Image (spheres, rainbow, N blue to C red):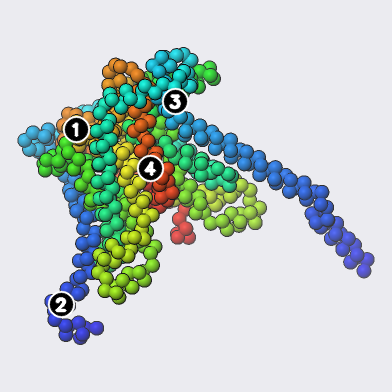
């Protein structure tokens, strides 16, 4: 092994060995650029900015932990927006997950017309963004279809988006009607469940519920878990709904953390303080994700582990 | 002997109910069929409920866009418009310069999609088909960046773009797409992994350079994934609002999403015509719905594979 290699001219030998590595790195270089300049650098820079005062004029002034103290102890809005955001997570994530599992199970039935239903269930998720927010603004209007439907059952509905108690649940309702991606992910997992497992339950005389409990649920639990993580992270960063539909109001009823951060950064241009806020939500998301993974050991089933 | 006979008789008796009596068996089969029918019926009932839950809002928007102002103020609310009033559409189109915004958004979408396709396929090829130092570690890093909350990077990114004078232009929305979105890289890599390694070997024997192998032999095979990425990128740019509202400051550079938000605030400050807003929602959503219908197959597959919609 050593002799033929050393007999070759050293420079050529080195080039031949280096070449595949260089080509590999060249191929992934576009990502290395964005990773360095749009991920690593901003990630560190926002940490450093957290200890400064910077209003886009002059250069950032180091102020120690002033931002952090203000954020944690003096600024009541931070706690309010965190409470609003977590309430929103609790209103949307568990119910949204349950709905997507149910809808996916439904779409996995062997009846006619499933492609049609799958398409129509997913369409609201495609529209997304501002359009969807405007759409729901009219649906939830005082004299809108939701309240009309409630009136049929004899209930006088609230003026959803302008009522302190109902604005947040109203946004949650909008969120629940657009959980298309989650539904498709779970549907894909359902279609991947091996049929022979169901046959095994049938041989043991198990009924439908037994099949669901002992085969379906464990088999799709990784997909459910993944969804839970992704939607929780996504919902914690919500912005557009509040920005377009309620502007955080009435009062602070729908003041999402994302909206508060946006205002600090891009309306008041407090870049230092907003960076501290960004790092706080990052740490919260990180902690929550780690916790989720810890808890997952008790309910997520992975084939390879057995 | 007698004992044996008795046993046989007993055996026959034990077997008879299931094998020798057709009436009971067919009844059983009938009950299974009935159970099935009941199950299907229940499934359809629930599917119909889901249909109303998901589709009604869209139907409502279309109906509302055809209503006159008077229709909105009636109590109880009218479900159908009193007449087929099309006036909301031209009024919405002209109340904000949507023509220009459509052109702007289309340009941004086109330029971004090209960038996403080129960069993600090249990087995906590197991670899937080449061996080099640090590859697996770097791929793990790439996967973990998919979970990084955007709020933690958005402020320094803004300051960076401001420093190089990009704020106000489309550049912060377009240029990053030429530097490989991790979700799309992941999609490309997973697909490249499924192609037989013999392809690369054969190309190598024919004296093909790695990049030529990528461009001439492997890339043409990845059309389905390229379609998925193109659709994801299209929809993500079209529905994005946060980045556009942060980076675009010149009125001439605005996008459809910002135009829509403008219309909303105009209405909030007076001029209360919900029909106008709904008409604008309809025509700004049409491109996405069209793309979805054209590329639904690719999109569904992409979501199933990556577990997300590309952001």
Find residue A210 and report its horizontal and vertical position in percent: 59, 48
Circle 2 or circle 1, nearest the eye: 1
Q: Secondary structure at mark 2?
A: helix
Q: Chain of mark 4?
A: B
> Could you say where residue B186 lies in the image, as x and y percent from the top left?
33, 55
> Where is mark 2, residue-wise?
A12
Which quadrant would residue B249 be assigned to in this image?
top left
Whether the residues at callouts 2 and 1 have beta carbons within 8 Å, the answer is: no
| Mark 4 or mark 3: whose residue is earlier in sequence | 3
Q: Give the spatial CA distance, label 2 vs label 3.
A: 73 Å
Say which of marks 2 and 3 sits in front: 3
Q: Are marks 4 and 2 on the same chain?
A: no
Distance from the alpha carbon under mark 1 to that under mark 3: 32 Å
Residue B174 is drawn in which quadrant? top left
The crowd level at tag 2 (other Cα within 10 Å; few <14, some 14-19, many 20+) is few
Q: Earlier in the sequence, mark 1 or mark 3?
A: 3
């Amino acid at each position: 092994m050593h002799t033929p290699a050393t007999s070759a001219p050293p420079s050529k030998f080195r080039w031949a060995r280096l070449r595949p590595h260089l080509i590999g790195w060249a191929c992934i270089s576009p990502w290395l650029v964005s990773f360095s300049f749009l991920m690593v650098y901003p990630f560190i820079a926002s940490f450093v900015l957290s200890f400064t005062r910077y209003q886009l004029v002059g250069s950032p002034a180091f102020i120690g932990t002033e931002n952090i103290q203000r954020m944690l102890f003096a600024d009541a809005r931070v706690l309010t927006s965190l409470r609003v955001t977590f309430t929103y997570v609790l209103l949307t994530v568990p119910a949204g997950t349950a709905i997507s599992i149910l809808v996916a199970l439904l779409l996995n039935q062997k009846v006619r017309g499933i492609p049609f239903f799958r398409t129509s269930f997913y369409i609201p998720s495609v529209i997304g963004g501002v359009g969807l927010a405007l759409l729901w603004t009219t649906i939830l209007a005082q004299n809108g279809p939701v309240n009309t439907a409630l009136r049929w059952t004899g209930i006088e509905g609230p003026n959803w988006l302008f009522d302190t108690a109902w604005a947040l649940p109203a946004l949650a309702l909008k969120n629940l009607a657009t959980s298309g991606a989650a539904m498709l992910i779970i549907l894909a997992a359902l279609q991947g469940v091996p049929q022979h497992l169901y046959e095994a339950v049938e041989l043991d005389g198990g009924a439908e519920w037994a099949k669901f409990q002992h085969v379906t649920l464990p088999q799709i639990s990784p997909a459910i878990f993944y969804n839970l993580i992704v939607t929780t992270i996504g919902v914690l960063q919500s912005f557009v709904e509040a920005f377009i539909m309620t502007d955080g109001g009435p009062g602070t009823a729908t003041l999402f953390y994302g909206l508060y951060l946006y205002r600090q950064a891009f309306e008041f241009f407090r870049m230092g303080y907003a960076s501290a806020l960004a790092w706080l939500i990052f740490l919260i998301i990180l902690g929550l994700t780690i916790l989720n993974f810890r808890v997952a050991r008790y309910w997520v089933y992975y084939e390879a582990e057995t | 002997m007698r004992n044996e006979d008795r046993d046989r008789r007993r055996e026959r008796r034990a077997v008879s109910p299931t094998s020798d009596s057709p009436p009971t068996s067919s009844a059983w089969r009938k009950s299974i069929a009935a159970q099935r029918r009941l199950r299907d019926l229940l499934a359809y009932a629930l599917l119909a409920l889901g249909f109303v839950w998901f589709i009604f809002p869209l139907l409502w928007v279309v109906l509302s866009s055809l209503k006159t102002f008077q229709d909105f103020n009636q109590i109880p609310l009218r479900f159908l418009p009193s007449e087929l009033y099309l006036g909301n559409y031209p009024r919405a189109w002209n109340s904000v310069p949507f023509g220009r915004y459509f052109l702007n958004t289309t340009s941004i979408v086109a330029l971004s999609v090209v960038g996403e396709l080129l960069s993600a396929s090249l990087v995906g090829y590197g991670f899937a088909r080449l061996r080099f130092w640090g590859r697996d570690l770097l791929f793990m890093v790439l996967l973990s960046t998919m979970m990084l909350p955007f709020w933690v990077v958005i402020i320094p990114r803004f300051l960076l773009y401001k420093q190089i004078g990009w704020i106000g232009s489309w550049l912060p929305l377009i240029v990053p797409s030429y530097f490989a979105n991790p979700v799309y890289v992941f999609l490309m890599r997973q697909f490249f992994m499924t192609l037989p390694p013999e392809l690369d070997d054969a190309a190598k024997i024919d004296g093909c350079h790695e990049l030529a192998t990528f461009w001439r032999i492997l890339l043409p095979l990845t059309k389905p994934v390229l379609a998925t990425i193109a659709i994801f990128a299209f929809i993500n740019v079209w529905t994005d609002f946060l980045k556009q509202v942060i980076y675009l400051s010149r009125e001439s550079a605005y996008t459809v999403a910002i135009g829509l938000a403008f219309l909303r605030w105009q209405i909030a400050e007076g001029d209360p015509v919900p029909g106008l807003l709904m008409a604008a929602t309809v025509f700004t959503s049409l491109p996405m719905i069209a793309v979805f219908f054209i590329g639904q197959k690719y999109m569904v597959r992409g979501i199933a594979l990556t577990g997300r919609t590309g952001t």
